[in-house]
Image (cartoon, rainbow, N blue to C red):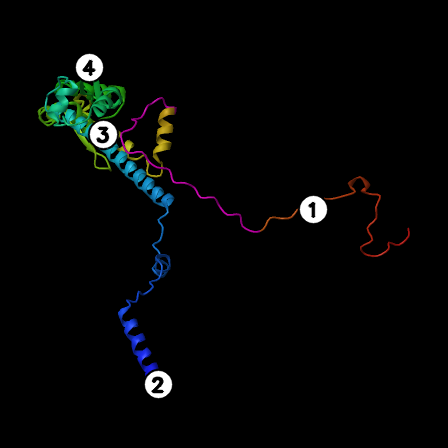
Amino acid sequence: MDPALVRERELFQKRALSTPAVEKRPAASESGSHKKKKPKVDKESSSGSKNSSESANGSINSKASAGYKFGCLAKIVNYMKTRHQNGDTHFLTLDEILDETKLLDISLKQKQWLMTEALVNNPKIEVRDGTYGFKPKYNLKDKKALLRLLDKHDQLGLGGVLLDDVEEGLPNSAKAIKALGDQIVFVTRPDKKKILFYNDKHCQFVVDEEFQKLWRSVPVDSIDEEKIEEYLKKQGISSMQETGPKKVMPVQKRKKQSGQRKRQFKTHNNHLAGVLEDYTDGVPAKK
């Protein structure tokens, strides 16, 4: 090889080594295109889910607050009933009731609801000059009041009085009932509820044996209670009402119509009856 060319080649290599080389990098847009794109979150869907969750929480809170309100009302009514049964029949203010039932932490809104709606409209609470007391079905002060009530029911043919109503309205009812002894009679209904009747000792007399035989000879097994009550009404005798549980009348099922309905066809030319002749059997012979 020519020594001059060899020398130029060596000089070129030296210059190339002394000159720094800069590598050209790809643009930022190109490199970003290879990366995975993050999915965009739909603002409308996120806001909708947020609103639905807020509405769900609001409904749960409203139900919880309503349940708490009626729970407070039930606690107050039960407390007033218990203190009435124990003989504490004097009326209390709402603040006294809340203090004794330990419900002082209720809000002003709930307190206003108790004052204006709940306690005023409750059938078991009596309101008197801003104070509250228990209102039983029969307000009985002592055993004499109970005996008068049972005697009145007996005279008017109203039957007996439920033991639950007596215990609700008579303070220390168990002690009073025990003191009356044989002046009252207990009858247990089929639903296990007990009824108190007045034991009228004037009706305790000896019945002639012949009359007893006549009484027992009349069969009533085949007669239901409705027919007996209807017969008593015709004779002008009233029967005891509401002394037992009400009977539920069974619903009668409709009977399915058996067979197919007969199809009815319209008849035509009724005005020509007697004029037209029937040719189904052939031409009739001439007369």
Q: On the image, which quarter does residue 211 sit in?
A: top left
Instruction: Please give left or right for residue 28 compared with residue 118 in the image.
Output: right
Q: Which mark is residue 2?
A: 2
Task: Characterize the magenta stretch by its predominant secondary structure.
Answer: loop
For label 3, the residue is 69
Residue drawn at the location 35% of the way across and 85% of the way down:
2
- Residue 245 x/y as whole percent: 28, 34
- Residue 74 x/y as whole percent: 20, 29
CA–CA distance between discs 3 and 2?
Answer: 112 Å
Q: 10 Å neighbourhood of mark 4: few (<14), some, or many (≥20)?
A: few
Q: Which mark is residue 265?
A: 1
For label 4, the residue is 130
Q: Quadrant of the N terminus?
A: bottom left
Q: Element type at marker 4?
A: loop
149 is within the stretch colored magenta: no
Disc with the residue nearer the chain's start (1 vs 2): 2
CA–CA distance between discs 1 and 2?
Answer: 131 Å
CA–CA distance between discs 3 and 4?
Answer: 20 Å
CA–CA distance between discs 1 and 4?
Answer: 80 Å
In this view, which residue lies farthest toward the bottom? 1
CA–CA distance between discs 1 and 3?
Answer: 70 Å
* Range of residues picked out in magenta: 234-259
Disc with the residue nearer the chain's start (3 vs 4): 3
Relative to 124, is 18 above or below? below
In this view, which residue lies farthest toward the front? 4
